[in-house]
Image (cartoon, rainbow, N blue to C red):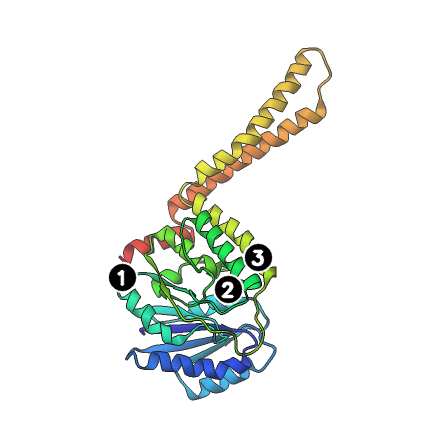
Amino acid sequence: MDLSVAVPLYNEEESLVPLYNAIKEGVEGLGLEYEIIFVDDGSRDRTFEIARDLASKDKALKVVKFRRNYGQTPAMSAGIDIAKGDVIVTMDGDLQNDPRDIPNFLEKMAEGYDIVVGWRHKRQDKLVTRKIPSKIANWLIGKVTGVPIKDNGCSLKAYRRAIIQSVPLYSEMHRFIPAMTSLSGARIAEIKVRHHARQFGESKYGLSRIYKVLIDLMTIKAIVSFGARPMYWFALLAVLPGLIGIACLVYGFAAVFAGNPLPISIAGSGVLFAALSFTLLLTGALCELIYRTGDIDLVRLAQLGTETR
């Protein structure tokens, strides 16, 4: 199969039929074998019923239903996991992304890129609650990960299936996919896309998601930094507690040799800090062993990126 379009949905009953028609219009003229995957993320309205009715009339449409709301990234991941197309396009289900941009993504992919990211250069969202936090987040993500993308939050992206299905996704990780795949040497491009104001329903995004993004950003930074040299970084983390532990123990022994009572609290702290340092070193050695034997997803992803060149 040539193309899969995966769309997570949550309470989008009013948008669903226009979205389906727009996707069909955007892909049918391409002359490709395609499928559309709708993932209902535990909607409380008639989203699933409408999607199921559409699927009963169209064999190219597949519908997945979650029993409860898990979030955008798990829903997107479910669609990606079952996709069979060589190229997978993801997008939001609120009609703000435009399926007419899909041919532009495929043209860019044909140039040899592994991931093409959409950039909402004329974003139709609220300034304070959406645009400003997004600009700050994109700048911060670029600085931390070293992958400068103008619009990490845009769900309209295209991926080679061999690459994206090897990337572990959870929490709000979908916005960090370019950074994750950069570990495999994936070629990443960014193109301008249309963006429309929401027509139906209410936005599922807000300032409350910021803390999740920050936590995930720290996770990604750890993965990107520790991935290739885990022993080095854990040894670096072990230096400070190791020095504190040695200093405390030396002070305790010096007090005993001087004929004074053993300072239990200081000596005990020294033992704890030394144990922490030793534990960090052992953890680094274990991570190094796992990395070298290729038993983690990042290593498989890197090998896959080499094989698909």
Q: Residue 112 carries which label?
A: 1
Left or right side of 234 for 157: left
Left or right side of 51 for 43: right
- Would you name the residue on which mark 2 appears? 73
Mark closer to the chain start, 2 or 1: 2
- Would you name the residue on which mark 3 appears? 210
Residues under numbered marks 2 and 3 in contact, where contact means CB atoms less than 8 Å apart: no
Single out the mark in the foreground, 1 or 3. 3
In the image, 17 versus 244, the foreground residue is: 17
Residues under numbered marks 2 and 1 in contact, where contact means CB atoms less than 8 Å apart: no
Asked which secondary structure carries label 3, the reply is helix
**Disc 1 crowd, CA 10 A, few/some/many (<14, 14-19, 20+):** few
- Residue at figure coordinates x 44%, y 41% from the top left: 230
- Residue at figure coordinates x 47%, y 62% from the top left: 153
Give the residue at the far bottom of this rendering.
57
Asked which secondary structure carries label 1, the reply is loop
Question: Could you tell me how far apart the alpha carbons at marks 2 and 1 are, in whole angstroms?
Answer: 26 Å
Question: Could you tell me how far apart the alpha carbons at marks 1 and 3 are, in whole angstroms?
Answer: 34 Å
Q: Residue 221 carries which label?
A: none
Q: In this view, does 285 lie above or below 79?
A: above
